[in-house]
Image (cartoon, rainbow, N blue to C red):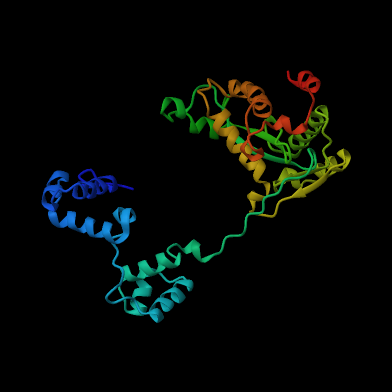
Amino acid sequence: MNVHKNARLTPKGREYLVELVKSGLSLKAASRAVGVSPRTAGKWLCRFKEEGIAGLADRSSRPGKLRCPTPPDVVERIIELRRQRLTGKHIARQTGVSPATVSRVLRRAGLSRLKDLEPHEPEQRYVHDSPGDMIHLDIKKLGRFERPGHRVTGSRKGQSNPRGRKQGGYGWEYLHVCIDDHSRIAFTDIFADEKKESAIAFLEAAVAYYRHLGVTVTRVMTDNGACYKSKAFAAACKKLGLKHVRTRPYTPRTNGKAERFIKTAINEWAYARAYQSSEQRKAFLPNWTHNYNWHRPHGGIKDQTPISKLNWDRNNLLRFHT
């Protein structure tokens, strides 16, 4: 309940008012004691007599019955015109009612925004049965720098032009990420580009990393980036015995686990502290990835750590936890 600062009575105060009257105090004396008029006190006493304690709760100020409600046929016409993507003022002119009435009708119908006219596709969440059944790959471009940027200094002076001309230590570097669909165990590395050679090298390193953990990878999912659509990448997948699955165009949610992992990495690693250079930021990446896999509770797997999904015994935990 949102009670304004000058409110005389809250539900508890109304109960106190009733108790005062029950104790033998007159209506006028009881109203004076709680700081309201006798008329207000009488209103709450009547509600209490009719409905009991429930009658002392707050109610909507909307009238129970409208004097001149909008006719049903006009309401249907307003909704019909809205489905034709007409604006509120255009609908008001067509139907002869005020824009405020059109707004109220559309709000009740859940059609106030144009995007409400298009039904949302149902969420299709999936998790593969075993580690390695599917790994997700993606790439995030990050700016290189040799000194703290505008996020730290608050000034962009001298930053954009050198990066655009790729002078000195500026330019771009690319975070390649891989995450296992079942366990959410992640593997990361940074390359100088997002070309097919880098994508293949990262894929081979990721498969070797999972093999080191006792996980055999059988399928890989990527978006439709040029490096992933190349014949060389297809040949690398065939050599590694992987089935390559690509997402439908313009549907990043299909590869949502990798997309979400990138967002987490950006928030908790890339922008989490004031790095003095991109090289220092790169040096922190292995430690952060290790913490993500071994120590960070993951909400998508009921707050377990990703490594716990491998169902290892204590000996394996001690052997691999370095």
- Asked whether residue 59 is in view, the answer is no
Name the quadrant of the C terminus: top right
Q: Nearer the viewer, residue 59 or 27?
A: 27
* Left or right, 31 with reference to 84: left
Rendering coords of residue 83 (x, y %)? 48, 72
Q: Nearer the viewer, residue 61 or 300?
A: 61
Q: Residue furthest bottom?
A: 73
Q: Nearer the viewer, residue 137 or 31?
A: 31
Residue name at image x 44 percent, y 62 percent: 113
Residue name at image x 65 percent, y 22 percent: 287
- Asked whether residue 125 is in view, the answer is yes
**In this picture, is 174 found above or below 286?**
below
Rendering coords of residue 96 (x, y %)? 32, 79
Rendering coords of residue 299 (x, y %)? 61, 38
Q: Nearer the viewer, residue 3 or 215?
A: 3
**In this picture, is 36 found above or below 140?**
below
Rendering coords of residue 131 (x, y %)? 78, 38
* Left or right, 279 with reference to 7: right
